[in-house]
Amino acid sequence: MDEIFGIPAPLLFGQLLLGLINGAFYAMLSLGLAVIFGLLNIINFTHGSQFMMGAFVAWMLLAWAGLGYWWALLLAPLIVGATGVIIERLMISRLYKLDHLYGLLLTFGIGLMIEGVFRNEFGSSGLPYRIPNELQGAWDLGFMFMPIYRGWVVVFALACCLATWLVIEKTRLGAYLRAATENAALVQAFGVNVPRMITLTYGAGVALAALAGVLAAPIYSVNPQMGTNLIIIVFAVVVIGGMGSILGSVITGFGLGIVEGMTKVFWPEASSTVIFVIMAIVLLTRPAGLFGRA
């Protein structure tokens, strides 16, 4: 099993692993976007900056408070999610009855401001974040060496995505959320505080982005541009999966990550554009997305 399709097996499986890792981040970020759009009808362009904030909060907790990776997984989503709640209450809540374009422009501007603040404070060169001792090293799988941390990222991201889908689709809370998007007045008549529920939903979507940022911190350098580099691809993933489709975002995120990784093996020149080519084809043939509803 030295070669597969004329490609060295370690190279092929290495790119497959890289595709799964990228797909994990695509899935978690597009999941947060899908939650916010599907339940609040807001196109949240701040999502990339909130992903970056999650990584920076993890770095700050370690550098300033001595709290390591495991604490960051718990605290960073809560801290960044709380900033999302403030943004939603002060600004975004005023736009729900307006056209989607207003929300997009507002969140785009907020994202630029957040990125500018972090760039001014920390520069653009990037800051290292150490892999926790428990997840260092690699497993020898026979056909390749798989870094333990990267395997952890894929498994943990998949578990988070499936748990989020189960909460929204299979629980009473998820039923309230979905009903509130259709008829908020009726849900409120049953004693549910709809504005608070919407605010917490936005905060939860932001927390998912921050959690992805913590996972990304040991793999990529923590820098203000790390969210900008991903957000355009993530929006393409959301469009392909179907705007607002929770399960579609998860499946499409992992699937497109693998497609991108395999393209780097067989046609490297097309690896940076393959996702956008797929998006164009999907929009021409199925405008609502692969899992979306017309």
Image (cartoon, rainbow, N blue to C red):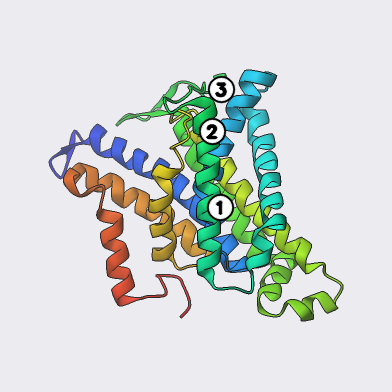
Q: Nearer the viewer, residue 165 or 111?
A: 111
Q: Is residue 54 above or below residue 170?
A: above
Q: In the image, what residue occupies the spot 59% across and 41% down?
A: 211
Q: Nearer the viewer, residue 54 or 175?
A: 54
Badge 1 or badge 3: first in the primary sequence: 3
Residue for badge 3:
132
Circle nearer the viewer, 3 or 2: 2
Where does the image place residue 31, in percent across and percent down from the top left?
53, 56
The quarter of the picture where residue 246 lies is bottom right
Dot 3 lies on which element?
A: loop
Instruction: Name the outermost residue toward the left.
Output: 6
- Residue type, mark 3 in image: Pro
Where does the image place residue 128, in percent across and percent down from the top left?
48, 22
Q: In the image, what residue occupies the spot 69% across and 20% down?
A: 65
Badge 1 or badge 2: first in the primary sequence: 2
Q: Do labels 1 and 3 touch, CB within 8 Å?
A: no
Q: Nearer the viewer, residue 155 or 188?
A: 188
Q: Is residue 214 above or below residue 202?
A: above
Q: Is residue 141 above or below residue 210?
A: above
Where does the image place residue 226, in percent across and percent down from the top left?
44, 38
Q: Is residue 224 above or below residue 84?
A: above
Dot 2 lies on which element?
A: helix
Q: Tell me the distance, in whole angstroms, between the alpha carbons under discs 1 and 3.
A: 23 Å
The quarter of the picture where residue 72 lies is top right
